[in-house]
Amino acid sequence: MKRFAQRIQGEAILAVDLEADSMFHFQEKVCLVQMAGNGENVVIDPLSLEDLSPLVPVFKSKSVCKVFHGSDYDVRSLYRDFSIKINNLFDTQLASMFLGEQETSLGAVVSRRFGIQLDKRFQKKDWSQRPLPNGMVEYAASDVFHLIPLASQIKAELLEKGRLAWVEEECELLSNVRPPESNTKEPLFLRFRGAGRLPRRNLAVLEGLLQYRQKLAMKKDRPLFKVFSNHSLLKIATELADSPQAFERIGCLSNNQIRMHGKALAGVVKKALALVPEQLPVYPRRKRPSFSSKVPERIKAIKAWRDAKAERLALDPALLFNKALMTAIAVARPTNAIELRKIEGIRNWQVESFGDELLTVLSAHP
């Protein structure tokens, strides 16, 4: 790996991909790093090496373009496991979206552009197993094989359409995403979809169930969803089911789950049901900001302009301006480019390419 890292220091472009084990273990980790460049295609085993510091200068270099496809997870994982930061990233999936392509998975893009069908037999396999079964290393290496020619082709098309600077800015922002910080004091229900709609008593039950699942998942070294599904826990909390018989009646758990964990889960529910009102959790609510009555009119006008512009450009409207950004613009009601640039979340390419038109739209709705 050290020799490879030295050989690729001066390369202009490299392809990168990762394989992880989030489908099989409680604490996910990077299990393979695949890289292609300088006529080489290598697969690195971080479970054997652990120290990937020789690669840090390569990823940090601003002169070496690192090509990923769907890089959000990869960027977070490299930082989480190895403190690797990435400069000069180019994401071919994101770039494909800015070309208006509908199907942007690597398999779909490679098939459409090169007429090649990628092998996806091992996509959902456990990459932490050692030794890896026959074919899995070749499969992993194949994911980076096409990325460099793919990036070259896509960049040329973006340049022709005047959108390369758009994608480069988005990629720079993408290279700075980080894994969420874990707060052990924070209730688990805060990251559970649907929790905000539950009454306080049901919320207490849900939190107890989530805590039980997390401890069990850690003990068994299994991902949370393979212990109990979110749907099962939400149903128990909604129905306040407090016995194995009740679990069976509402059909939220398998017979095997009830046999193994029914009594323990029932105990968790009963403990939450016994809490006095003062002990019940409260779901934090953000106070909705008060808007001028003109704001909805401005949002409607911006959206109509955006949708028409996106249709002419053959792009997903949300790529141009998402709902949150349109709302922020409508509230701020900028009257010039300087004020427009001050709006949180707005990109330089949005101001430069569409700022004048946007300000004209807003001027009609003072």
Image (spheres, helix red, strand yellow):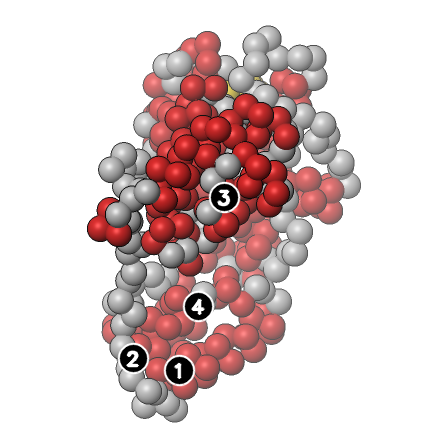
Spatial separation of the CA atoms under disc 3 and disc 4: 39 Å
> With respect to residue 146, does 34 lie above or below?
above
Spatial separation of the CA atoms under disc 1 and disc 3: 43 Å
> With respect to residue 322, does 246 lie above or below?
above
Residue bearing mark 4: 323
Residue occupying the point 35% across, 64% down: 346
Q: Please tell me how crowded label 2 is: few (under 14), some (14-19), or many (20+) other residues with Cα within 10 Å.
A: few
Residue bearing mark 3: 241
Q: Please tell me how crowded label 3 is: few (under 14), some (14-19), or many (20+) other residues with Cα within 10 Å.
A: many
Q: Is residue 288 left or right of residue 358?
A: left
Please name the amino acid that badge 4 sits on: Lys
Q: Please tell me how crowded label 4 is: few (under 14), some (14-19), or many (20+) other residues with Cα within 10 Å.
A: few
Please name the amino acid that badge 2 sits on: Phe
Which mark sits nearer the N-terminus, 2 or 1?
A: 2
On residue 296, which mark appears?
Answer: 1
Residue bearing mark 2: 291
**In-front residue for pair 24/124:** 24
Q: Is the C terminus in the top left, top right, bottom left or bottom right quadrant?
A: bottom left
Residue occupying the point 67% across, 45% down: 109
